[in-house]
């Protein structure tokens, strides 16, 4: 498992320990974690959740008009250290 998968799995495990159902998905350039957030989550639990997702490269909250709330976090995979990294417009 790539390092991003290990980090994402650790984030998912910590969110699950806080009572949030999670799912982890591998993508080409990142690993994502999503968790459904119940309306009943306390302020103290929110602080813990934010501490957990702060370990990701990016995170956010998707809220719908149906009162569904999905927390997401993304851990980027390391870029290749040699070779063409996506063409001349993507070189660093």
Image: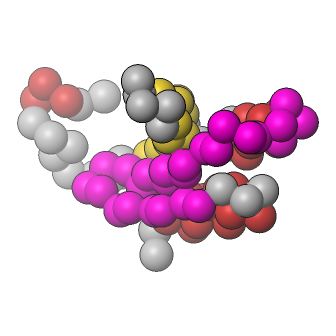
User: Is residue 19 inside the magenta stretch?
Assistant: no
Q: Residue 69's spot in the image, x, y percent?
A: 52, 36
Compared to residue 21, the image places residue 78 above or below, namely above
Which residue is drawn at the image coordinates 42% and 31% (left, top)?
66
Is residue 78 something that shows in the picture? no
Residue range (magenta): 21-45
Q: Residue 47's spot in the image, x, y percent?
A: 83, 34
Residue at the bottom extreme, as displayed: 1
Residue at the right extreme, as displayed: 44
User: Which of these two is toward me, 64 or 26?
Assistant: 64
Q: Residue 28's spot in the image, x, y percent?
A: 26, 55
Which residue is drawn at the image coordinates 59% and 61% (left, top)?
21
Could you say which quadrant of the image residue 18 lies in?
A: bottom right
Is residue 28 something that shows in the picture? yes
Q: Residue 31's spot in the image, x, y percent?
A: 42, 55
67 relative to 65 in the view: left or right: right
């Amino acid at each position: 498992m790539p390092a991003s998968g290990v980090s994402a799995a650790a984030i998912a495990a910590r969110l699950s320990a806080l009572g949030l159902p999670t799912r982890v998905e591998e993508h080409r350039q990142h690993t994502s974690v999503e968790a459904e957030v119940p309306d009943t989550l306390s302020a103290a639990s929110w602080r813990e959740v934010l501490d957990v997702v702060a370990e990701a490269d990016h995170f956010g909250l998707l809220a719908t008009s149906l009162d569904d709330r999905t927390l997401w976090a993304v851990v980027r995979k390391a870029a290749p250290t040699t070779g063409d990294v996506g063409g001349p417009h993507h070189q660093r």
